[in-house]
Image (cartoon, rainbow, N blue to C red):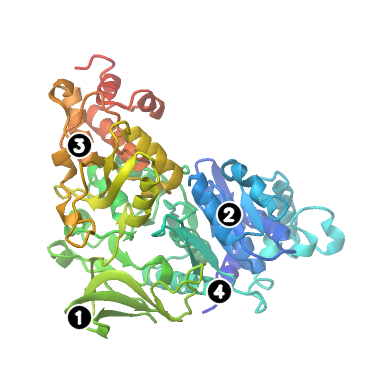
Amino acid sequence: MSHTTILRHWADHVEKEPDAVALATPSGDWTRRRLAAHAAGVRARLADGEGPVLVACAEPAPVIAAILACAATGRTFAPVDTRQPAARWAAVVEDLRPTAVVADRAGRAALAGLRGTYEGTIRFIDAEDARYAEDAECAESTLDTGGAQGPEDAGDTPGAGAAGGAGSGAWRAADRGASGTPDAGYVYFTSGTTGRPKGIRGSLEAVEHFLDWETTEFGIGPGTRVSLLTSPGFDAFLRDTLLPLRAGGSVHAPAPGAVPVGASLAAWLDEQRIEVLHCVPTVFRTLRAAGLTAGSLPALRTVLLAGEPVRPSDVAWWHGLFGDGKTLVNLYGPSETTMTKVYRRLGAEDASAGTVPAGTPMPGVEVRVLAAGQPVTGAIGEIEIHTPFPLRGYLDGRPGGFTGPRSYRTGDLGRLREDGSLEVLGRRDQQIKVNGVRVELGEVEEVLRRHLGVRDVCAAAVAEDGADPALCAYVVADAAVTDEDLRAHATAGLHPGSHPSLYVRLPAIPRTLNGKADRRALPPPSAVRAATADDAPRDGAEAEIAALWCELLHLSAVGRRDSFTLLGGDSLAIARLLDRLRSRFGVDVPLRVFADDPTVAGLAAAVTGGSGR
């Protein structure tokens, strides 16, 4: 197992079938030839430098090209979500100390405010440089002649000459995977307890261990079509992109920042003929409203769920539709140990289980449950994972849960069954998962406390009536502080995945005898937030839409003039709402119409043509 295996496999597929689609996006398809040329162009610009490379791109193609280029030149890469707030950008740049930045238009705009802090010390590489088209032409001529260009032929074309030839010539199997290329790995930033992002260091050797397992376990091979629903700022992006490229398949992505849900997701899976779907259970669950039948999604054969607990009802619904015809898999593993380390093929027995097991370890992985520091079976304790490759820890060097060069205590509580299956039962600290995104409750609280009008705050994940958990901020604040003020403040200081969905006002935060916040004593949001009678939705469309809002936002009641976004509707919730409106009323409500009047009354007018029937 070597980190260069990924590049060798990719190079083989580029040479064998250069015109096959490597990446399909709404803005156009990228052949292997074109993607290899783009990666070679970035590689040429990185070849004469050293140090970490920050990758700030919204589109997937330049991110993939930068990852391949960094892997080939022995440079650490750190992809980020371009939608993160300015404060988080500043912390990432300060902690990573990149010597180069690869950015597209969105990344350049996001970094514009920081230019003065790094000007002259960081090399800026334009991910959309038009000259990459010349690299593609070089790649074509290289393929036609079957060899890489020599220096005398390279001219001034970016990506040629010193880089070993542009395009696919730079990705010939004989040229890739040299033993002297170091595994500089990657850094991904996640939430931190102090309100500052925490950099997790990983290796491509660890990624290769995972890719080799999934390729073998689920028969990923040439032509396999794999979904990409993950932001570049999460390490699962490596799984969703490198898995098909390594195996000779293709990556399929929707528009950036617009994960399809419900009927839209089903239509996209059908249109793209997706065979392997990776997603979080929250997104998977939206397919239940898509009206699927036993004959739906004929191309789909495997669904792998990670990031959140899978419910028995999820398994019962899927197995009831497709039986064993479409494999449903539960995955578990923290970013610190590189994606999945435990898996389970879910069957009929899991549909009636009290808890759906996370499963058994991948080859070479050992999982233990520790109680009072000792391994136990059948009892609840903290989950510890041992890997067959070295772990690289956090960027700041703090030990955290790393207890050895190959071991990590996850902070998750679990139980090992007698048959060796692992059950994951929750957290022992203040970390939660919402929509598959890791959220540190302490970070949310720390940011909100910085608002001058907030006197106390407690963040919690709240699930009412079996709904998906929602991130709720219970605040003690001055009367003049509005929810809109708090949302703007949170947006400026928190990653999009860490924004509270609900703000609940309390006269005081309940506390235990030792002064700690007593989360068990926090009232349900539905008991605190209720619409006033004079603002109640009218009968007909308004009442139906209000009921839908309550379901999506975990509220007991809403007013007809309440704003969906101010009540906590994020991009995923908005997509689910528009999808449900389409199914219920047979009307497509454009996003711009929703944005103009995101209220119950406004949407009722939109779906009824203004009649408010």
Q: Amino acid at mark 2?
A: Val
The residue at the point 77 percent across, 59 percent down is 160
User: For mark 1, what is the residue?
Assistant: 419
Q: Is residue 206 left or right of residue 288?
A: right
The residue at the point 16 percent across, 33 percent down is 530
Q: Which mark is residue 3?
A: 4
Q: Amino acid at mark 4?
A: His
Q: Which secondary structure, mark 2?
A: strand
Q: Which secondary structure, mark 3?
A: helix
Do the CB atoms of the residues marked 1 and 4 lie less than 8 Å apart?
no
Q: Which mark is residue 550?
A: 3
Q: Earlier in the sequence, mark 1 or mark 2?
A: 2
User: For mark 2, what is the residue?
Assistant: 55
Q: CA distance from mark 1 to mark 4?
A: 33 Å
Q: CA distance from mark 3 to mark 4?
A: 48 Å
Q: Earlier in the sequence, mark 4 or mark 2?
A: 4
Q: Does residue 84 show up?
A: yes
Q: Quadrant of the C terminus?
A: top left
Q: Earlier in the sequence, mark 2 or mark 3?
A: 2
Comparing labels 1 and 3, the label whose residue is closer to the camera: 3
Q: Position of residue 377 (x, y in %)?
A: 20, 82
Q: Which secondary structure, mark 4?
A: loop
Q: Position of residue 249 (x, y in %)?
A: 49, 60
- Snapshot quadrant of residue 239: bottom left
Q: Is residue 431 left or right of residue 419?
A: right
Disc 3 residue crowd, few under 14, some 14–19, many 20+, Cα 10 Å: some
Comparing labels 1 and 2, the label whose residue is closer to the camera: 2
Q: Earlier in the sequence, mark 3 or mark 4?
A: 4
Do the CB atoms of the residues marked 1 and 3 lie less than 8 Å apart?
no
Q: Amino acid at mark 3?
A: Cys
As drawn, 583 above or below 457 = above
Do the CB atoms of the residues marked 2 and 3 lie less than 8 Å apart?
no
